[in-house]
Amino acid sequence: MKIANRMENLSPSVTMAITALARELKAQGKDILSFSAGEPDFDTPVIVKEAAIKAINEGQTKYTAVEGIIATKQAIINKLKKDHGLEYKLDGIVISNGAKHSLFNLFQVLVEDGDEVIIPAPYWVTYPEQVKYSGGVPVFIETNDSTEFKITPEQLKAAITPKTKILLLNTPSNPTGSVYSREELLALGEVLKGTDIIVFSDEMYEKIMYNGKKFTAAAQVSEDMYKRTVTINGLSKAVAMTGWRFGYIATCDAALAKALTKLQGQVTSNINTMTQYAAIPALEGDADETIEMMRVEFEKRKNYAVAAFNDIKGLSSIDPDGAFYLFINIQEVTNDSMKFCAELLEQKGVALVPGLAFGTEGYVRFSFATDLATIQEGIKRIKEFVENK
């Protein structure tokens, strides 16, 4: 049967493909160390699992409102107020099947054919694919490690055209771990004043911060940014709930939330009911002690990996302020990140993600969301590989 033409412009996720390949090779008995997946190696906190079990035992297994139950939406509102001083109403919250689903809904609801979406590069692989699928045009702003992969107000101003509809920010960033400060967000907001440009702020990694830095939400830096920003977040990374599929948006535009709910009602309806109940203690802070334990462990791994990679001749990495990735500069070795990763996997059994997948050649992404012993062995193999080249 003939597949719809729109699928021709949609590329498969490189990160998912490499992770699947690594699993397949491991299942064949090969000695594979994978640093490709953005998934914490920790278990979901006990209090979260217990909340899900309690919901099941109490019969909370039926359909809910498409946009989520009131108790969970209120927990999101309380969390945003407590963490960032932001005020939202129930009609501005929509819960979806992970932040990826939230983003897809947003692009489908807001983007018309030809609308431009500004995306700083490197970027999460899904962003441009969803924009293109929705009929939009991704407009990339190139960055590198000399600016910690963050765009400047001057770059933003130069990228804006009459067709610009959305600026997509990801802080902390996947794949670089870079974090925009309050001052940097304010400066970007100044460029947007007087425009109708919407800001999508993907803040999935907000709880995973390092080097004593504090996270600032895009919507909290000014009244203007609050009004134009749609916050996208979830519990997959910080609370180790990747498989639970819990994402949400927060907006002060009730009409936008209503449109998102209408679309979701015709596609998935509500996310699974048990996850909504499990999310409440995570949002209300009951799992904060476990979240902090994970963050501390991530930071130990990060510190080791940054020092170890910077000790390898030909490789270098910035010290990221958030998330659990290093975006490693391999340009002294090669500019072909696909070939680098393919040969590394074949020769040393180490899986990384090529920078090309994130729109920036000459780099590779290394996830340190695994135990320290595995990280040490993986970097040892990478060092041997680079030295041989």
Image (cartoon, rainbow, N blue to C red):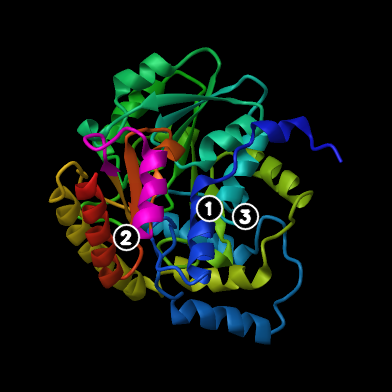
Q: Nearer the viewer, mark 3 or mark 2?
A: 2
Find numbered disc 3 in the image and state the secondary structure of the residue it sits on.
strand
Residue interval drawn in magenta: 328-349
Return the x and y of residue 240 as percentages of the image width and height.
44, 68
The residue indicated by pointer 1 is: 16
Q: Does the magenta stretch include residue 346?
A: yes
**In the picture shown, does residue 141 fall above or below 175?**
above
Q: Which residue is drawn at 26% across and 39% down?
A: 330
Q: Residue furthest top?
A: 162
Count of all numbered marks drawn on residues in the image:
3
The residue indicated by pointer 3 is: 96
Mark 2 surroundings: few (<14), some (14-19) or many (≥20) residues within 10 A: many
Find numbered disc 1 in the image and state the secondary structure of the residue it sits on.
helix
Q: Hey, which quadrant is residue 272 in on the image?
A: bottom right
Find numbered disc 2 in the image and state the secondary structure of the residue it sits on.
loop
Q: Residue at x 32, y 39 (%)?
A: 363
Mark 1 touches mark 2? (CB < 8 Å): no
- The amino acid on which the numbered mark 3 sits, given as a three-letter code, is Ser
Which mark is drawn over residue 374? Answer: none
Q: Is residue 289 magenta?
A: no
- The amino acid on which the numbered mark 2 sits, given as a three-letter code, is Phe
